Amino acid sequence: MKKVTNVIVAGLGGQGVLKLTDILADVLFHEGYDVKKSEVHGMSQRGGSVSSEIRFGEEIASPMIPEGEADLLVSLDSTQTQINLHRLREGGTVIRPEDEPIGELSNPKCANVLMLGALSRHLDIPEQALLDGIAKFLPAKVLEMNLAAFKLGRKGGLK
Amino acid sequence: MSEKLFLSGNEAIALAAIDAGAHLGCGYPGTPSSEILENVALNGGKAEWAPNEKVALEVAIGASFAGARSFVTMKHVGLNVAADPLFTIACAGASGLVVITADDPGMASSQNEQDNRRYAVAAGVPLLEPSNSQEAYDLFRQAFALSEEFGTLVLFRVTTRVCHSKCVVIRDGSPVTPRPTGYVKDIRNRVMIPAFARVAHRNMRDRLRRLEQRNETGEFSTEKSGTPELGIIVSGISYEHAREAAPEAGMLHLKMTYPAPIELMRNFAAKYQRCLVIEEGDPFLYEQCRIHSIPVEGKPEMFRFGELNVGRVRRIISGAAEDEAPAPAGKPPQLCVGCPHRKSYEVLRDLGCIVAGDIGCYTLGVLPPFSAVDTCVCMGASIPTGLGMRHVLPEKDARRVVSVIGDSTFLHTGINGLVEMVYNRPATGHLLVILDNSTTAMTGLQEHPGTGRKLDHTRTEHRVSIDALVKAAGVDHLDVCDSTLETEKFRSLVQERLASNDLSVIICRRPCILAAAQEKKLREAGK
């Protein structure tokens, strides 16, 4: 079986889950991977649970990660971690908001980009490609603080 | 020209429309279809929001009569609204006309799980089903050519995961300039009086026979051979799940599922010890196989509900019949903090109203802390269902009934209910509250005929006034208030109107907080 990497990002509506996966999927696409990204729009945007999934590798079939096969789970909200754990494979990695330096952010709205930085520690993608991806998806006036948030997440660890 | 893009199914369909030289796309917003027309406009095509799906299809039919390539977008339930023109034009025939139905298995954002593949059979039109963004792009371009070759409307069925999943797409068609249009008189195919319609019906059945023959050639399917133990007949998103769940199995992947290629399926099934039909929703292909005595196995009934995925397809293949563990419940959606509907619902709840509700963000008023919506059936149903209750309830309860509808929904099919309200007036009168937040909020802030902006958010002077429509219908009272800033005024108005035997309409007008932010951005951008 060809190697496929499965990433789930979970959070609540308004936390920027979809923005995070938009950036990451686009970067992976430009890095030359076959990529699929899937999520459910609609009702979930009104403050409810939101999750978005990305699969990448040489060839991807289903856009949805099979149960118990996610390699990485990124949770943007502590209430959303537990309910998504069943989707993780045995030995998979959870990236929890409590373990990341979100408290150091000047603007908590950048938490999603910080978590992208935290996720990037587990992915073999050039840092510059991710920085370029962030610049492509976010407006100029908030770019600097988001790039800083990304770097904070990529460095990782709480003070 | 060929470029490699990363697209959702909806984005891919929009580009296909441009590359096919479509003159006009019409529709009404509905998850998961809404982004198709938005992306047509973003890419320079002509796209319009109609007040409802029936109107959208009729506009597209007119464009087709005039020689254009036209298409319509809607969610699955929208096709119920558009079913009247659909069935007649299916018989009459059409050229360059494609209807997109975006079904929602699992009901991510819908009131039912209907499988619109049934419409293809009921109306008598060919049905195309892509399984990913690339196929959506390729097939949608083909759909116009197919429609023109056979002289039929083509039904193009996508589902939530095809619409919203993103994948790599090779765009290998260059944008085509729409061809010149022109009118050619053809009353036998366009005026469906019985004498002409009887012939049209026979023509339609003949078209379907020829389409089936075409489908038998394998042009709309791919076959992959596999180990002799298992063959799978599959269509739509289920193809992607099945090829992952059973890479060793033989697979017949159908892209035109009606009229189905019966002999192709029969020959395929004969090659395998076991042949399974894997499909989301209704046993649509399975039934077509069984009617023709093709020895296939369907899925157990439990898999009729909800979406399929790789795990569920594996269980269908293994024959697992034990109950599936429900996924842990997430946090339900709710009305936004600052949503103007909040105060309206607080008042209706506190006054003990029986609220006949409708479809939109404001349906979320059913959830705590409001628990203020008592019924919700379909678009526009709030007014007639409220009237029905008023007609038969004892007076004390009849006086508690209020119909609540949003602005976009009112313009969709609420107007008909308003006319009914005036004509068949209940003895206790009635109260209609229009929650006007100046947008189509739930589906992603689309414009509508009352917002003063067109689909691409450019301004228009041609705005339809809800107030003027209501007045013209002939109700006794029309009041406009902002229930957030004037909560007490709204409360006393509701009380007063419910106590009377009058026909009253109160418009609660305050922009959706998300739409207000969008409006600010548009203004900053000089739009």
Image: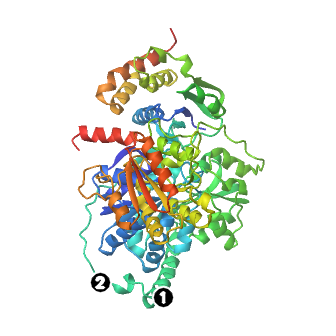
Give the answer, above or below, for where B49 lies relative to B191: above
- Residue B184 picture location, percent across and down: 28, 81
Residue at the spot x=38%, y=18% of the render?
Answer: A148
In front of the other: B305 or A131: B305
In front of the other: B271 or B439: B439
Residue receiving disc 2? B185
Q: CA distance from mark 2 to mark 1?
A: 19 Å
- Residue B444 picture location, percent across and down: 42, 46
Classify the position of the N terminus of chain A by image quarter: top right
In front of the other: B78 or B344: B344
Q: Residue furthest bottom?
A: B195
Q: Which mark is residue B522?
A: none
The residue under label 1 is which amino acid type?
Arg
- Residue A130 picture location, percent across and down: 40, 26
Residue receiving disc 1? B198
The subunit carrying tag 2 is: B
